[in-house]
Image (tube, rainbow, N blue to C red):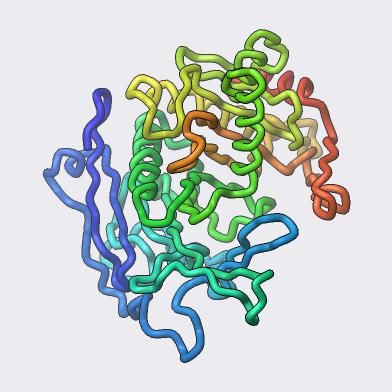
Amino acid sequence: MMTETQPVRRTRTTLADGRELIYFDDSEPYVSGGATRRLDDPRPLPDRFAAAPAGSPRGPQMRFDVLTGEWIPMATHRMNRTHLPPADANPLAPAKPGAEYSDGEIPAEDYDVVVFENRFPSLLQVPGEEDLTTPLDGEPLWPTRPAVGRCEVICFSPDPSASLATVGHRRMRTIIEAWADRTSELGKLPGVEQVFCFENRGKEIGVTLHHPHGQIYAYPYLTPRTATMLRRAREHRAATGRNLLRDVLDAELRSGRRIVAESEHWVAYVPAAARWPVEVHLAPRRDVPDLPALTDAERTDLADIYLRLLRAGDQFFVTGDGDGEQRAIPLPYISAWHQAPVREGREDLRLHLQLFSILRAPGKLKYLAGSESGMGAWISDTTPEKIADRLREVLA
């Protein structure tokens, strides 16, 4: 796999329990093929598809909520996943040179970007298991089916102390290539309806592994937010003949009040009805359904403006240290790539990034309490214009 401005080499291997791992290399001697990362995994792991106890499913299951129309995966095995391990047992770090191989996920002693199947997935296609819908307890009101799909982890850097904001343009460009590659490949899997690339960052968000990484989910259904956006987009097209997300971007550009950054191919803005204490959307100027559809120039431009937004986020809040000195607070955030579904709605939905945080002030979180959690009725603690003003102040 090659790009015009930056070569990226993709190398596949299989971990001891049968999961796939893929190295994405942009540095020598690996990118040219002069050397290859370690491919064998000597861990004594059991086959992940080994027979389950009698009467138990071999993979995660999901149940349909008839009150909301949503599928809810039941991935009970995730209760035993790795949680805040010590620094010397970080499963996302490279293998230590000369050390006895530990239970880390990456065999190589170094890497650029690496993607592998999650050891504790919420969604999993079990070989030989049919995707059949059956009633729970014999009641047709409660459909159940296997939670088919796939969950992957993407490691942005071998350095546990790094962050996505610090990886640099070249590495960010490789990460974008990996996102696009996995979106394309996962979209071809049987039963997959939607691919979602995202990053959770910070203990306040609930991160259990403090290593710069993100995740990629391939869902066997349309997620609730995507289904809602698709319904609204179709209603808008029926009423106006136009694309809703295109009209949103054009309206923000005409207003200009909430635009925080622009480049040749991208526009960053705080949406007019932003609900989070910190929230910014990043959209391509061209109508693009997903990451694989981006041109080389759009991907290169994205690497620059995305890093600028991440660095601005880390300057959004400051606090004093008692001596009058101001210190920036690393922003806990969720970065969510909204892409058109694999099959339906590709002409109605449009690629865009939603970057947001639950931090509303230093040491204070936006709690999703009664109105938000119980009723789904959002109440904002600020205004989109204030968010935009602050982001413009701190953007490099």
Is 168 in front, or is 190? 190
Residue 396 visible in the snapshot: no
Residue at image coords 54%, 24%: 283
Left or right side of 52 for 338: right
Residue at image coords 26%, 68%: 41
Q: Quadrant of the N terminus?
A: top left
Left or right side of 223 for 115: left
Which residue, as the protein is rendered here, is positioned at the far left? 34
* Above or below 77: residue 92: above
Residue at image coords 35%, 20%: 297
Which residue, as the protein is rendered here, is positioned at the far top? 254
Which residue, as the protein is rendered here, is positioned at the far right? 370
Residue 138 on image: x %, y %: 63, 80
Residue 299 on image: x %, y %: 39, 26
Q: Quadrant of the C terminus?
A: top right
* Above or below 154: residue 26: above
Which picture quadrant has residue 309?
top right
Is 166 in front, or is 333? 333
Residue 275 on image: x %, y %: 76, 35
